[in-house]
Image (cartoon, grey):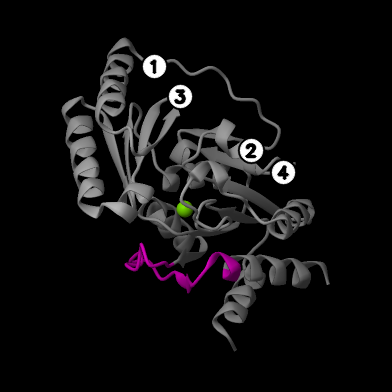
Amino acid sequence: MSRLDALVETLLTLERPLLLALDVDGTLSPIVRDPDLAEIPASTLATLASLADAPMVEVAIVTGRDLGSLSRMEQLEGVWRAVEHGALVLAPGQVPSKRELTGTQRTALSRFRQWVEAHAGDAFIEYKPQAIAVHVRAVAEGDPARAEWLLAEADELAQRLGLHVRRGKALREAEAVVHDKGTALREIFERSSAKSVFFAGDDLTDFPAIDFASAHGAGAFVCSEEQRVAPSSPATLLRSVDEVAVVLSQLLQRMTA
Ligand SMILES: [Mg+2]
């Protein structure tokens, strides 16, 4: 039996309701140089919509993107969403309530923003409600040393400002509020009354969620040139975004056969 078939078989044996939770970039959508241009293939969106409709199945999107950036990529109905690496968890149809930062948190983020504007103009910057993310993938293509310098400086400054530092494959993110995808996945698991969970992700920031899923169902790690080191939990290794899509579509076929 192939690796993918074995994973599908495992998922079919998990107790229902089954929560299917998925990272976006590098998992559902191919990594591209400009994150604003990343897209989830239409066939994958259709599969996710059908899975969300299937009885005793819950679908969750778990991403570092904020809600605005995610809504450009998917507007699925009936799915859970954890955005900003889990800072905000929304049930299907739930509208986010207003979140307030303290004065200290606002000041720290605005200092970080000043540094970004003065020194990191060549990086791709994501301004989120409670965080600022510095992406250096495009910089690294032309000047790896410069990319390393940006990551190191952003890391040190965020720490000095008392912000939480999130470290990804080509990312440093300064966050005013501490959280992670593992905690967010646990919250969705509990609120959705799922009995088991599957999660797939491709980055260091996905490891807490992969660990949680491995302990309560099954986890998968999408390996890439950028991230070869897999999590320590017994996750299935997937080799590409296409393999994730195959697993989801086979699962749907088997569940609705
Ligand atoms: Mg990812």
Give amino acid for label 1.
Leu
- Residue at mark 2: 72
Which residue is pictured at 46% across the width and 42% down the height? 64
Left or right of 14? Residue 105 is left
* Mark 3 to mark 1 CA distance (whole Å): 9 Å
Q: How far apart in space, not on screen, are marks 2 and 3 (Cα)?
A: 17 Å
Residue to which mark 4 is pinned: 76
The residue beneath circle 1 is 101
3D distance between C-alphas at marks 4 and 2: 11 Å
Q: Quadrant of the N terminus?
A: bottom right
2 or 1: tag closer to the N-terminus: 2
How far apart are the two marked residues, 4 and 3, measured between alpha carbons? Answer: 22 Å
Which residue is pictured at 50% across the width and 47% down the height? 185
Tell me which residue sits at (71%, 32%) in the image. Answer: 93
Give coordinates of residue 126: x percent, y percent: 43, 33
* Amino acid beneath label 2: Arg
Which mark is nearer the camera, 4 or 2? 2
Q: Is residue 230 magenta?
A: yes
Q: What percent of the width, then of the height, locates residue 237?
A: 46, 72
Q: Quadrant of residue 11?
A: bottom right
From which residue to which does the magenta span run?
223-243
